[in-house]
Amino acid sequence: MPFVPRLIIAWAINLAALWAANALWDGVHIKGWTAYLLGSAVLGVANAILKTILTVLTLPLIIVTFGFFYLVINIAMVALAAWITPDFSIRGFWTYVGTVVVIWAVNWIGGQVVGDVERARRPRLI
């Protein structure tokens, strides 16, 4: 799949993840479509660039903590999106943890659906 459609799909999946987190947790407050659009864009860029760099730099710490520090990096990415985006706030550590879990789950489901669509579009050799 070309880059631009993948980018739009990833943006839409992040938007759906933020909507689900806002619907599930009382501590998540996202007001208006601009906050959803900007928040999902910031989250996507932060995950693509910053999270990759931080993961490589802290790989020994991630290994020593059996992956727990990777959760901390994910929380930092969501906190960055909440900090940059107006009308987007999250209150409480456990709300951050729950938000990260919801975002992970929605992204995983969205990735599975997009993968199934891509596999269905490929021509079969046999």
Image: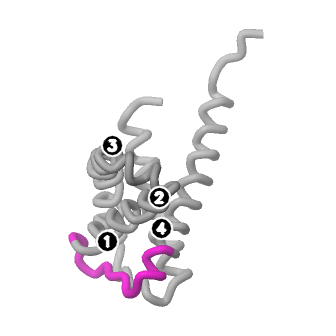
Q: Secondary structure at mark 1?
A: helix
The percent position of residue 124, horizontal first and vertical second, equals 71, 16
Q: Label 1: which residue?
A: 79
Q: Label 4: which residue?
A: 100
User: Disc 1 or 2, which lies upstream in sequence?
Assistant: 2
Measure the alpha-carbon separation of dots 1 and 3: 20 Å
Range covered by the magenta-colored residues: 84-97
Measure the alpha-carbon separation of dots 1 and 4: 10 Å
Give the residue drawn at x 21%, y 70%: 84
User: Disc 4 or 2, which lies upstream in sequence?
Assistant: 2
Nearer the camera: disc 3 or disc 2: 2
Callout 1, which amino acid? Ala
User: Disc 3 or 2, which lies upstream in sequence?
Assistant: 3
Q: Label 2: which residue?
A: 65
Query: In this rendering, is residue 80 above or below 50?
Result: below
Q: Secondary structure at mark 3?
A: helix
